[in-house]
Amino acid sequence: MVHRLLNWKARVSNWTPPAGGAVKGMLAALFVVAMLASPVWAEHFDFDVTVTSAKDKARSSADTYPPLQGRNPRPVCHAKVGEPLVFQFFMSSNFPHDAIKGVTVRYFIVPIPKVGSPEVPKPGDDALLNGHFIMDFKPDTGKVGLRQVFHADKPGVYLVRVQSENSDNDHEHFSALDLVVE
C-alpha cells in the first residue's frame, strides 16, 4: 500500500502541464462549446406566434436582430382569400433579475414582396392587423398575449410579426412568419 502511494506521488511530482498556448486553446474551445450549447442565456423574451387557416398552421418562436429579418428562416402558413384566419401570440419574459419596464410589444401583419423577404416594412394603411401594448414585464413571469380572428381580402404574401421595442437592451427580440394568401 505504501509502495502504491509513493509511486502515485512520484508520478504527480513528475507531471508537467501542457504549454500555455495549449491551455488557452482548450479554455477557449470549452467557452465556445458552452456558449453554443446555451444560446438562451442572453435572451430576455420568449415568443409563441401562430397563424391558423382552414387547412394550415404555422408557428414561430423567438428570434433576434441584427440582421433585420432575423437569424432563423420564417415558417409559412397558406390560406385562401376571405377565409377566417386566427392570429395568436404569447410573449413572456425569461429575464430572471429585474423587471423590464416600459416595453412596447408591437404586432402587425403587412404585405411583403415575396416569402422570406428581408425587409420589415412599417405598418401602414395596408396592414391587415396593427397594434401594440406598453407594459412592464416582471422577472420570469411577465406575459402578454392576443388572439385575433381576421381575414385577407387580397391575395399576396404577408409578414406576421410580433416584436419588442424600448426594452433597454442592446438588441430587440421578435418572432415572425410569412402568410401566403391565394
Image (cartoon, grey):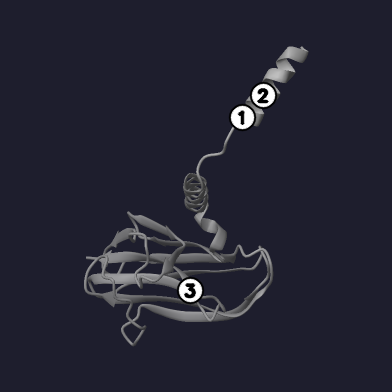
The nearer-to-camera label among 3 and 1 is 1
Residue at 23%, 71% in the rendered image: 156
**Which image quarter holds the N terminus?**
top right
Graded by Cα atoms within 10 Å as few (under 14), some (14 to 19) or many (20 or more), the crowding at tag 2 reads: few
The amino acid on which the numbered mark 1 sits, given as a three-letter code, is Asn
10 Å crowding of disc 1: few (<14), some (14-19), many (20+): few
First-in-chain label (3 vs 2) = 2
Which numbered tag is attached to residue 10?
2
N-term mark: 3 or 1: 1
Distance in Å between CA atoms under marks 3 and 1: 51 Å
In-front residue for pair 54/121: 121
Q: Closer to us: mark 3 or mark 2? A: 2
The x and y percentages for residue 157 are 25, 70
Give the SS element for disc 3. Answer: loop
| Callout 1–callout 2 Cβ contact below 8 Å | yes
The reply to whether the C-beta atoms of the residues labelled 3 and 1 are less than 8 Å apart is no
Between residue 169 and residue 33, name the one nearer to us: 33
Q: Is residue 102 left or right of residue 23?
A: right
Which residue: 36% across, 83% down? 123
**Residue 71 placement (x, y as % from top left):** 37, 62
Give the labeled residue for mark 1: 14
Residue at 36%, 73% (x, y): give it. 68
Q: Position of 19 compared to 2: left or right? A: left
Q: What is the three-letter code of the residue carrying label 2?
A: Ala
Q: CA distance from mark 1 to mark 2?
A: 6 Å
Which quadrant of the structure image shows residue 100? bottom right
Q: Quadrant of residue 129?
A: bottom left
Q: Mark number for residue 171?
A: 3
